[in-house]
Image: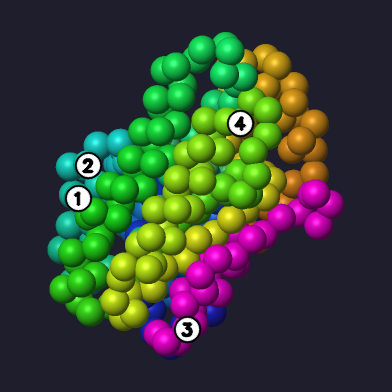
Amino acid sequence: MSTTPQPKVVLVTGASSGIGAAVAEHLAAAGHHVVAGARRTDRIEALVQRIRAAGGSIEGLALDVTDRAEVEAFVAAAVATHGRVDVIVNNAGVMPLSRLDRLLVDEWDRMIDVNVRGLLHGIAAALPVFQRQGSGHFVTVASIGAHQVSETAAVYCGTKYAAWAITEGLRLELDPSIRVTTVTPGVVESELASTISDPGAQDLMAAYRAASIPPGAIAEAIGFAIGQPPEVDVNELVIRPARQR
Ligand SMILES: NC(=O)c1ccc[n+]([C@@H]2O[C@H](COP(=O)([O-])OP(=O)(O)OC[C@H]3O[C@@H](n4cnc5c(N)ncnc54)[C@H](OP(=O)(O)O)[C@@H]3O)[C@@H](O)[C@H]2O)c1
């Protein structure tokens, strides 16, 4: 395991699979202290075992980002254990795609609750800690869907445009002692498409997602952003498969 000169306390939401799990593994392998949260606690427990077996530092917690009190408790637990929080990676997200005329309103609500409210809950919980410390780093995992809209993805893209805008607004408002990064992945191998219930959207996605890159590519990008010196703020990183247009 490589070591880093300045280990950071890094919180990762949605760490039970895909990008979040890869971020946790990558940052722990680099010597950082990871606090990982998601709802599937069996997956979080397996991640904790894997990382500890490799010599890394991690705590795993049950976390539903739609519950503001749970997100506050997640951040408070990290402060209680480590005395500080250096980075929060607001990564949790869902993508149950469908055409608007299918009227899957419950799924629209779920995307808004996880992808937008969950991000806001992470910001609300970590911001006072960062301000008290005089340092901190917000990382939002948005999507290429924050920059372009496609059929069946109106609501998902709407949530990702919102995530992009909220994160950019945060950057503009904050003192420069707190850094803000938006990470914008293209198609990445993960379980994200498994939340699609609509058969038409499933077929479209199967073709769209044929060329993908491993989640470690996004983890590397996040590692790069948080490894910069305090005066350098990597504002946005777009990482797509080379074949993606
Ligand atoms: N894969 C891609 O192609 C791609 C592209 C662009 C952007 N992204 C974004 O990347 C992020 C991670 O997605 P992924 O691709 O890694 O998909 P994934 O494998 O499905 O992971 C999604 C993660 O979000 C968590 N999550 C969902 N609802 C949650 C909730 N209410 N509270 C806490 N955690 C919750 C899931 O954990 P639990 O179910 O255990 O709670 C899981 O750990 C998402 O924001 C997604 O929009 C992905």
Q: How far apart are marks 3 and 4 (CA)?
A: 34 Å
Are the residues flagged by discs 2 and 1 in contact, CB closer than 8 Å? yes
Q: Distance between the residues labelled 4 and 1?
A: 30 Å
> Residue under circle 3?
232
State the residue at coordinates (24%, 54%). Answer: 124
- Residue 227: x and y in percent read 49, 79
Q: Distance between the residues labelled 4 and 2?
A: 26 Å
Question: In terms of image quadrants, where is residue 111?
Answer: top left
**Residue 94: in sight, yes or no?**
yes
Indicate which disc residue 72 carries.
1
Judging from the image, what secondary structure is the residue with disc 2 in? helix
- Residue 27: x and y in percent read 48, 67
- Could you say which is closer to the camera, residue 87 or residue 168? 168
Identity, as a three-letter code, of the amino acid under mark 2: Arg
Indicate which disc residue 153 carries.
4
Which callout, 3 or 4, points at the residue further toward the start of the chain? 4
Identity, as a three-letter code, of the amino acid under mark 1: Glu
Indicate which disc residue 68 carries.
2
